[in-house]
Amino acid sequence: MVHYDVVIIGGGPAGLRCAEVLDGTDKQVLLLEKNEIMGDKVCAGGLTRKDLAILDLPDEVIEHKIYDTALHALQYKSETHAPEAFVFTVNRKTLAAWQAKQINGKNIEIQTGVRVAGISKDKIRLQDGSEIGFQFLVGADGVNSIVRKHLKIPNEKRLIGIQYTIPVKNPTPQLELYMNSRLFHSWYAWIFPHADNLAIGSICDPDIITPKKLLSNLKTWLKDKNIDVSQAEYHTWPISYDYRGHQFDNILLTGDAAGLTSGLTGEGIYQALVSGEAVAKIILNGETVIPEMDEILRYNSIQEKILWVFIKSGPLRQTIFKSIILLMNNKWVKEKIKRSFS
Ligand SMILES: Cc1cc2nc3c(=O)[nH]c(=O)nc-3n(C[C@H](O)[C@H](O)[C@H](O)COP(=O)(O)OP(=O)(O)OC[C@H]3O[C@@H](n4cnc5c(N)ncnc54)[C@H](O)[C@@H]3O)c2cc1C
């Protein structure tokens, strides 16, 4: 049986970031991705400056640099033009290919089209029945993680994401978010511009609005906005924000597998990158205190508290949304937001 110091399951942002940090070290690493092409994941592909501070992406990987946003709550609207771009859209396959290209060391082996089918204490089993031994196992295998299941960690706090990809020539490079309590409850609908399409979608807790109802609500909203989806691709994928730890002896969880996505916004790439890096440091140095990891846990916890307020506010929710818009249109607040973007 072949043996590696580290086996990483999953070639998403978390797994690839972990491999990059282990690149060039004395650890023999195997990264396994079940799809032939990495990065094929339902996602709006929105990154922030925090992501770019980690990834330093070249312009050719970025589809749009976004300076303009519009936040809506029914007829109310707040528009912001930031002095510097603060959201960046990417194609997830391009992002994964670029991340993989950064890994050059002989100690890292990446295999695609290989699905891990089983896990035991110190070895994994592939779909063809072969076994691979490990000293450390990194679960970077997303929301339906086989590693998390092996650890018997429940995954109760889940959202459902739905999204249309609509072909559009030269879309306006503006990010739009729509809060509408009746249609999207405590969450929102988004429009993210990409190179030749718009990603339009929404998220919700399926116990609050069923996925079928969420889709019907999104369709109502799209019709109201005169957006034609007859040529669009439709995708749906769950999101987990049920974080219960990332280190379990020699098994580590990252990104969506660890439940690190924001329960409010659905943002998870940054958390995936930070946790991928954090578990690599744990493997390399046995570090247990990782400030960046604590910071994302704090960030997610604040987002969850805001979500809790939105959920509990019932009929007052739309009024809260409207108040957010009015507040954002206040001259002093607008100036503060602008400054925070520069
Ligand atoms: C509709 C929607 C829109 C979103 N939009 C945004 C956004 O705009 N910005 C943002 O920051 N986040 C967004 N997210 C969240 C973001 O997509 C995830 O948080 C992010 O992809 C997590 O990265 P990851 O590496 O942890 O997992 P993933 O990207 O899911 O990668 C996991 C990888 O593991 C592989 N894998 C799984 N099981 C196995 C196995 N058994 N063997 C081998 N390989 C396996 C998968 O094929 C996959 O490639 C969105 C999510 C949804 C659902």
Image (tube, rainbow, N blue to C red):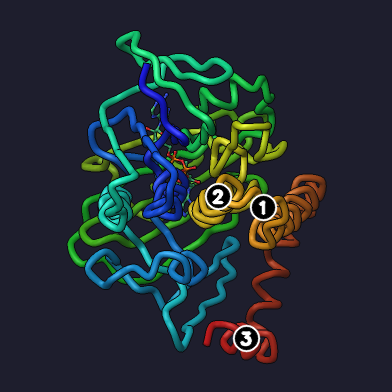
Residue 241 in picture, x, y percent from top left = 64, 41
| Element marked by disc 1 | loop
Is residue 239 rendered to the left or right of residue 320? Answer: left
Quadrant for ligand 1?
Answer: top left
Identify the residue at image location x=54%, y=68%.
Answer: 71
Categorize mark 1 by other alpha carbons within 10 Å: few (<14), some (14-19), many (20+).
few
Which dot marks residue 287? 1
**Label 2 vs 3, first from the N-terminus:** 2
What is the CA distance from the residue labelled 2 to the residue labelled 3?
44 Å
Residue on which the image places disc 3: 334
x and y, in percent, of residue 121 in the image: 58, 18
Q: How many angstroms separate mark 3 from mark 1 (CA)?
A: 41 Å
For the N terminus, which image quadrant? top left
As drawn, the label of residue 284 is 2
| Secondary structure category for the residue under label 2 | helix
Q: Nearer the viewer, mark 2 or mark 3?
A: 2
Q: Residue at x 47, y 33 (%)?
A: 141
Q: Residue at x 43, y 69 (%)?
A: 52
